[in-house]
Image (spheres, rainbow, N blue to C red):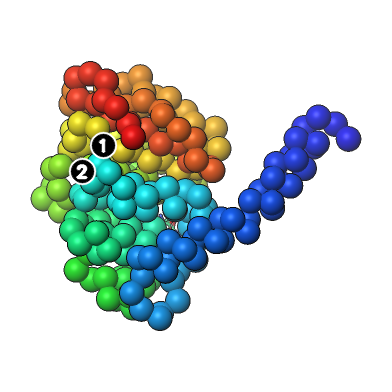
Amino acid sequence: MNTASAKRRNQTRIQLEQLPSEMFDLQRVGQEVSSGTTPLPSAGWWAMTVPSLMYVVSEVLGAPARRSVVECGSGTTTVWLAMALRHVGEGHVWSLEHDPVFAARTRQALAAQGLDDWATVIDAPLAPVDVEGEGLLWYSFSDDALPDDIDLLVVDGPPGAVAPKSRYPAFPRLGSRLVDGACLFLDDTVRPEERAVAAEWSRSPVGGRSVRAVREISRSTVMSVSVGGVSEQR
Ligand SMILES: C[S@@+](CC[C@H](N)C(=O)[O-])C[C@H]1O[C@@H](n2cnc3c(N)ncnc32)[C@H](O)[C@@H]1O
């Protein structure tokens, strides 16, 4: 067996060994934050992996408080983030969604959990945006649809099939709304395209905000935002 396939097999073995504890975490946190008997939307596949989902939820449940949550790409994450905000009793998640079918699905899943007051799915069709002189397809929405004090930004869309740099505009377009010490969570950085996006964000401050990678979780990268200096990430 060559080194690459031995490495892949080893990674698969580790993932399988971790599965029971991930499912245990999911169940434990689900019991803590959900209020009803309606089944929760599942993690993995198109949705975030369990460890990534648990991480963004822990950002809401932990300290410092993350109450002003924006995400790019709605779905399971929207429901879990809204449940976590309801559990702590304050905050809101605004989720940009380009696909009306998935927007409707997410709204339905939120309604099934009684979470309408905690999350807003924003219909945001993809349209060309000018980012540093480059025309890229990204979400279109009105300026006042999102808050100006985002403390958690979860970037899990648009899908990679839209363009190799489909997620790049998130920081250039929303960076100036991020508060000092905010968390910027980019999913799928196991892919070279998203890794390149994270690296480019780290090199190019926006509106006085700079970001740096502080942790890798499952398939994702956690970045810390600082305004004019270095902020500490918990
Ligand atoms: C990676 S998904 C994001 C999902 C969400 N953040 C989550 O973890 O549940 C990015 C986008 O893909 C689309 N999408 C979601 N589920 C899909 C599926 N099963 N097949 C195709 N596209 C999907 C939606 O438009 C969504 O905004």
The x and y percentages for residue 176 are 18, 33
Horizontal side of 70 relative to 167 (left or right) equals: left
Horizontal side of 231 relative to 148 (left or right) equals: right
The x and y percentages for residue 226 are 24, 26
The x and y percentages for residue 187 are 45, 43
Q: Which of 93 and 194 is in front in this view?
A: 93
Which mark is first along the chain, 1 or 2?
Answer: 2
SS under mark 1: strand
Horizontal side of 110 relative to 161 (left or right) equals: left
| Identity of the residue drawn at 41% across and 80% down | 38
Q: Are marks 2 and 1 in contact (CB under 8 Å)?
A: yes
> How far, Cα to Cα, is label 2 from label 1?
7 Å
| Identity of the residue drawn at 42% across and 66% down | 30
Residue with the mark numbered 2: 150
Q: Can residue 228 be seen in this view?
A: yes
Q: Is mark 2 within 8 Å of ligand 1?
A: no
Please identify the quarter of the rendering in which residue 113 is found.
Answer: bottom left
SS under mark 2: strand
Residue found at the very far bottom of the displayed protein: 37
| Identity of the residue drawn at 49% across and 61% down | 26
Specify the amino acid type for callout 1. Answer: Ala
113 relative to 48, above or below: below
Specify the amino acid type for callout 2. Answer: Ile
Q: Is residue 135 visible?
A: no
Residue with the mark numbered 1: 182
Q: Which of 25 and 206 is in front in this view?
A: 25
Quarter of the image with the C terminus in it: top left
| Identity of the residue drawn at 25% across and 47% down | 66
222 relative to 36, above or below: above
Local crowd at mark 2 within 10 Å, few (<14), some, or many (≥20)? many
Q: Nearer the viewer, residue 127 or 217?
A: 217
The x and y percentages for residue 101 are 38, 69
